[in-house]
Image (cartoon, rainbow, N blue to C red):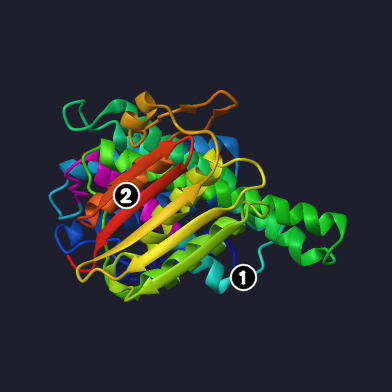
Amino acid sequence: MSLRRFLHESLDDILSEWEKEGGLPAAGQIGRRLHFGQVLRAVADEMNRMSASAATAAAAAAAAVAEDAPRRGDGSEPSHSHAGQLVDDYASLRASVVRQWRQKHPSPSAADLDELVHFNEAMDRSLAELSATFSPSQSQPNALFLGVLNHELRTLVASILMSGQVLTHRSAPGSPEGKAAQRILRSCEQLRQTLDALSDFTKVRLGSQLEIDRVDDDMGVLCRQALDEYAQIDRERKVRLSSDGDLHGNWDTVRIREAVRGLIANAARFASRGSAVTIVVDGHAAADVTITVHGDGTPIDLDTLRTIFDPVARVESDNATYAGLGLGLFIVSKVVDAHGGQVSVDASEEKGTTFTVVLPRRA
């Protein structure tokens, strides 16, 4: 089933599933459901016309939906309290639509990839138009720009990822083509994680708090899962994990894995070439579980240590400059804060770099 046909024929089911996934909170649920139903209809109409002139007209139609919504008295107002909530809604709806469509259509064709691009472009335009209705006093323009940029970059990553999956299925295992496809998938995963960090950064800058969905789990298992996810990106770096004690607690498993991946990545970044990163999970304390992530190598200078958990921080040494967005440790600190925990870093010539996280077992 094509994506545009899926949008037309399954709109109510799409929105209902989005509600189940938590995309629509109870407050203002009816108005936001009506609003985003109109957004998806406008997006589907644009995809049906499939021409540059029609795309312009459909973009105007999507803008009209956004501009008209606050003036209607029929309960269809989107009622976003701040711009961060707006970005969250578009992100979760986009992800939900693609996920539901892929479940019904698991083998996309080249034409399907084109449709996905059109869908994401239309969603981006609708978000940009509605974002303009927020005044500077309600949001921070730079952070809102990053939110829109994040959506547009996800369009490219989704297309590349689906193309890599198609290449993987059509290539013989171990062939040059198959290896190239695997590199594409690994790069897409790294980009996805970077965009996730950028999305979290934008939410915080726009006034949102990181959402925490706690469940009972084993911290040793979560750290092993995070290690396996990191290994998909950096297969050359050796990472050793050990754990002891009672490792059970109540945490957001997705956020914890994200934080541990960030710690592994930064410990590996500071570690000397060929050395291993070590992770130790200690559950002997009654109320807390402690995670330490260590890497040998050039220590971080004292000035940098003071700001290392700030956003867009850069870490320099005599040997190299470690580039990147600098959001990883900032997100780690926010995840730990949201769990009521503490994170710290210690670095010296003798001991290398060690990150320590202490997390309460319960809220």
Mark 2–mark 1 distance (CA, rounded to whole Å): 26 Å
- Determine the image quadrant of residue 359: bottom left
Give above or below for 165 relative to 47. Answer: below
Give 261 or 209, whichever is nearer the viewer: 261
Q: Is residue 158 visible?
A: no
Q: Mark 1, residues whose alpha carbon is within 10 Å: few (<14), some, or many (≥20)?
A: few
Residue at the disc numbered 2: 88
Q: Is residue 196 visible?
A: yes
Give whichever of discs 2 and 1 has the lower sequence position: 2
Tag 2, which secondary structure? Answer: helix
Give 356 or 44, whichever is nearer the viewer: 356
In x, y percent, where is residue 255? 36, 58
Q: Mark 2, residues whose alpha carbon is within 10 Å: few (<14), some, or many (≥20)?
A: some
Q: How many marks?
A: 2
Please tell me which residue is depicted at 35% across the width and 33% down the height of the picture: 311
Amino acid type, mark 2: Asp
Amino acid type, mark 1: Pro
Please tell me which residue is depicted at 36% across the width and 32% down the height of the picture: 305
50 left or right of 140 in image? right
Give 171 or 356, whichever is nearer the viewer: 356
In x, y percent, where is residue 139? 22, 32
Q: Which residues are magenta?
A: 77-95
For discs 2 and 1, the disc positioned in front in the rendered view: 2
In x, y percent, where is residue 244? 39, 72
Tag 1, which secondary structure? Answer: loop
Please tell me which residue is depicted at 52% across the width and 66% down the height of the picture: 101
Give 118 or 232, whichever is nearer the viewer: 232
- What is the quadrant of the N terminus in the image? bottom right
Residue at the disc numbered 1: 106
Give above or below for 6 relative to 51. Answer: below
- Determine the image quadrant of residue 292: bottom left
Residue 325 lies in magenta, yes or no?
A: no
